[in-house]
Amino acid sequence: MFKLITAGALADLVQRAETAETSLADANRKLADLTARQELALEREGEAAELRKELAAVNVCLRQRDADGESFRLETNMLLAACDRTIAELGAELKLVRADRPAGPELPERTVLTFRTVGGGLVALIATSGPCNYGYQCLTCGDEAGGAYSMENARRWANEHAAECRAIPPAVVTRT
């Protein structure tokens, strides 16, 4: 019996054959590349022995993993669930800590930098009215220098004040 092949079917078969040949050529190139790499690796006898040992260890681990696949997935899921619980517990604890923490002092408008004083307060470097006008204000003792000072001078004075100011900020009492 003869089977009739149409021109369209023949073109499709030719295209599939060309695609298969291209895939085969790519696979052969990859195989040649891998073979060359393997030969280079095996040239050094010491490295080859180490590779064989590592490969044997990996095969043992793979066999064990395949044998215990379900157990492995179950343990992983349990660990992930424990991590999720821990994250949730830490998030709840963080919310409580943030709720108990006293709010810091409100910074003046146009604060550029803040410096921590020796007593634990803050000194704010503030941009004043002009483009290059700066001053500072101690939020603990109330000392301030405002006006048309350069950034460098205002910053230096604010830092010097912070290094010397021993005023302690008022404690914020939380009610329980």
Image (cartoon, rainbow, N blue to C red):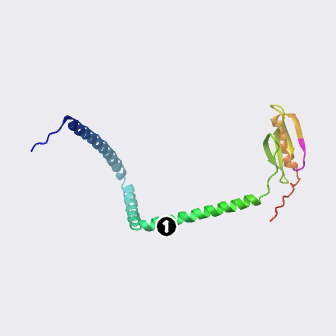
SS at badge 1: helix
Residue identifier under label 1: 75
Q: Tell which of 37 and 82 is nearer to you.
A: 82
Relative placement, left or right, of 48 versus 15 is right
> Could you say which quadrant of the image residue 52 lies in?
bottom left
142 part of magenta stretch: yes
Which residue corresponds to the image point at 32% horizontal and 48% vertical from the top-left? 35
Q: Tell which of 21 and 82 is nearer to you.
A: 82
Magenta residues span 140-144
Mark 1 is on which residue type? Glu
Residue 92 coordinates in the image, percent (x, y): 67, 62
Relative placement, left or right, of 105 versus 43 is right
Q: Tell which residue pokes out farthest to the left in this image.
A: 1
- Which class describes the residues within 10 Å of circle 1: few (<14), some (14-19), or many (20+)? few
> Could you say which quadrant of the image residue 95 lies in?
bottom right
The secondary structure that most of the magenta stretch takes on is loop
5 part of magenta stretch: no
How many labels were placed on the picture? 1
Q: In what quadrant of the picture does the C terminus appear?
A: bottom right
Residue 62 coordinates in the image, percent (x, y): 39, 62
Which residue corresponds to the image point at 39% horizontal and 64% vertical from the top-left? 66
Give above or below for 11 relative to 78: above
Residue 146 coordinates in the image, percent (x, y): 88, 38
Q: In what quadrant of the picture does the N terminus appear?
A: top left
